[in-house]
Structures are given as C-alpha cells and as structure tokens.
Amino acid sequence: MNSPTKITIARGDGIGPEIMDATLEVLAASGANLEYEEIQIGESVYRRGIMNGMEPSAWDSLRRTKVFLKAPITTPQGGGYKSLNVTIRGALGLYANIRPCVSYSPFVATKHPSMDVVIVRENEEDLYAGIEYRQTQDVTQAVKLISRPGSEKIIRYAFEYARANHRRKVTAFVKDNIMKISDGLFHRVFDEIAAEYPDIEAESMIVDIGAARLADTPEHFDVIVTLNLYGDIISDIAAQITGSVGLAGSSNIGDQCAMFEAIHGSAPTIAGKGIANPSGLLLASVMMLVHIGQSEAAERIHNAWLKMIEDGIHTVDIFKRGVSKARIGTRDFAANLIDRLGERPATLVPASYPAGVASSFSGIALKGAPAQTKKLVGVDVFLERKGGTGDDMAALFQPLLPAGLKLVMVSNRGQKVWPDGAPETFCTDHWRCRVMADGAEELKHGQVAELLARVAKEGLDFVQSSNLYTFDGANGFSAAAGQ
C-alpha cells in the first residue's frame, strides 16, 4: 500500500469542529489514504494577539504538506484583524478559487433544475489586495490592482480546467465599459488566450447583466472566469440558486499549495446544536482527494452523498416536507453517508473522476506582452480642501505651476468641475488637479517634485499624487467623468 498523503486540517470556529468531525469520519470509511497534521486557526488565535489568525508553526505545516482542509472560522470584528483566507491565498500563491455550483433537483428545491456552473475566481488581486486609505475627512480610497500576469494565470487556468473536465464554454465577467484600463486589461488577455483554445467556446459579458442572467438562466453558462470581487459575489449567488449555499465546496489552487473549504461561514448561532450540514466541507474534501490523486475515494464519497440526497435523507437547511424522507443532524449525516459508500445515485448524474483528472495545472506559462515605450506626460495631484468650487481650486492651484506645466482639469470624486463644470455637481473635500506637460513631449520627475514642493510651501494638503504615463503613445490613465 502506498504511503498516506499528509494533509493539514483545521477545525475552525462555530460549526467548524462539528462538520470537520463528520467529514473526517467519512474520509476514514471511504478508504482515503490520508495522514493528518492539525493546526489551530481562527478566533482563539486572533484573541491571543496574532492579527492574521494563524501561528507561525501553522505556516510550517502548510508548507510541509502543501494541502489544507479548512473548516470555517470567525474573524473578530474591528481591531485591525486581517482576513485569514485572504492572507493564506496571497502568501501561498493560491491564485485560483474554484466553486462548482450544481442543482440537485428534484431532491433539493431550486428554480433551476439543470444548473451546472463552475466559477473560476481570481484569488490574489483586485480590491482584495486590501490597500485602502482614508485620504480626507470625507473620503476614503480602495486601490484596485489588476496585473497582466495575474490575469493570464487565472484565464489560462479556466480554459485548462474546461478542457480537462470536458466543459464546452468559458465566459468572462468584466466591467470594462466603466473600468476601461483595469477590467479592460483582463478582457484583452481573455480574448488573447481564448484564441488558443478553438475547441472551447468563449464569450465575455458585463458583470451586472452577466450576474442577472446567471440568476435567471444559469443553464446558459458552463465555466465563468472573473476578477476577485465579482467572483466572490457571483459564486455565492450561484451556490444559493442551486438550492443552498451550505452544499457548496471550493478549492483554492496554486502552483505549490492548495486549500479546500466550504464556502459558508462559521454560523456561530447554530454551533453546538448538532444541526449543521457538513456537505460543503465534505464536497471540498472530494475536490481535495481529486487534487492529490485519490480519485477512487473521491468518487465513492461523492456518489454516496448523491445517493443520500436522492434518498431524501436531509439536514434541516434543505429539508422539505413531501420531498425529504428523514431529517438528520450532523452526526447522523456521517453515519447515513457511510452506509451508502459503494452505491450510486439512480436519478442524479453519478460523479466520475477518472485517474489523471487534475485540479492544478502546474507551470502555466505566462506569455506576457512586448515591452512598450513608457513616457511620463503628467501628474494628478489630490488635495484636501473644504468648500469652494472647481473654479476656486483652479485659481488657487495655477499660480503654483512651474514652467513647462499646465493645469488641464480639476475634478471632485472623479467628476470634472473645471473647466466648464456643472454648477449642480456636489463636491466633497477631495479634489484632483490634473497637470500636463505644456508643449513638451515628456515630463521630468524633477518637475513633479518641484510642483509638490510648491504646493506644500503654499500650505495646501496634498494627500496623493499619481504620475500619468503613455505606453506606445496610448494613455495609461483614465479621463474624468464629464471630459
């Protein structure tokens, strides 16, 4: 017999310990060949003053086993505590979050009985980088970071996943009608990579209409790939319309490590009552078994679970009179599933995991793009100033400009207010003055530094400056609304 695969487990908070116990019972009965290293994470660790919820020794375990089965945790509110999930994903390079969302009609109530959608969510970038500032008394800022390498990795992963799992179509969700540079980059990379997979249909949608269509006609979709924030939102929507968020598991895949978890939270209000549904964590463990090459055990567990659902043996969250045959608790869940190991569903589509079906595609090549000529052509200077108009700000700022620079625009919260601003525009204390080279092809950093020095000497509070570049002559910056 092969040596057991070592994995790291964490029982988490709230209902976490209960559903982990049930999952581990099933794994043991299934013949999965596993050895566990257990770590403590979550609320108790946060309360000891460790702000990311995980002790250094826990990181050592993850780096050693490279596979993490994690129950949900509770992050204390306030106090600067960091999201453990976001920390783990970023630190270990878990760039791909995979969430299968499948309906189990007629055994679990849903308006979409034929739904079978996989959400592939970018996991490291976007607003989840957590770069935020309070810049003025009235205005805060969150920085959205989208990179070409990050986009390439997740988009290629989506197409490789579709091909390996015999999926027919990949759809990108973006908002590049508004965020033309950041989401626009993701869209362009999607089109480039899609051309390399002629066997798979490719389409893109604006995320708002895409989410509406997902909620209304999910059968239109097969694999959806999208940015971090959109993916977080639509994967919960997709899971819910299958019948229950509590049935969905997910995987977080990187080149070296992987994490598997339910998508629901720690549900502290029902902790200890013995009514929690372990299905999300159990199905995450099925994804884990496929990842580590134990497909036979994965198939046995998944088909036993489908048979139990089909037999109407349901926990309270999906119990429905006239459909369900018995209402069970967390411990009976494991016992009933174990009794069905080796059985297959008669109505629902049986799970099949042929050997060699991968959940990670190591060494995804990054093609990159040819280097472009980058020129500094201007600078946006952001200032805090209470009251006044765009005309007032322009009159105050223009005398401070060094030779060779000109003020071309003043905006407030992204809306142009000078020149030719609308008198109805509501303004806060957050102003942006756009300065460009006057007659010169390119600015020098020294000119930007001189401008900021003059602004400081005048006693104006500049809270941020952003250099404006062109790349091969194309603007690498957005216009203000109203321009």
Image (cartoon, rainbow, N blue to C red):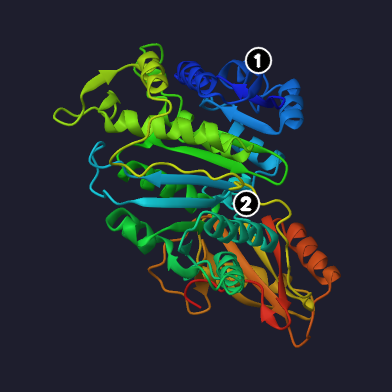
Q: Contact (CB < 8 A) between labels 2 and 1? A: no
Answer yes or no: is residue 133 visible: no
| Mark earlier in primary sequence (2, 1) | 1
Answer yes or no: is residue 162 visible: yes
In which quadrant of the rendered view does residue 220 lie? bottom left
Where the N terminus falls, by quadrant? top right
Q: Residue 170: x, y in percent?
A: 48, 63
Residue under label 2:
125
The residues tagged by marks 2 and 1 sit, at their Cα atoms, a distance apart of: 29 Å
Q: Residue 442: x, y in percent?
A: 79, 81
Residue type at mark 1: give it.
Answer: Arg
Q: What residue is at 52 percent from the left and 58 percent from the top?
A: 162
Examine the rendered structure and indicate whether residue 15 appears above or below residue 174.
Answer: above
* SS class, disc 1: loop
Q: What residue is at 63 percent from the left and 68 percent from the top?
A: 433
Residue under label 1:
48
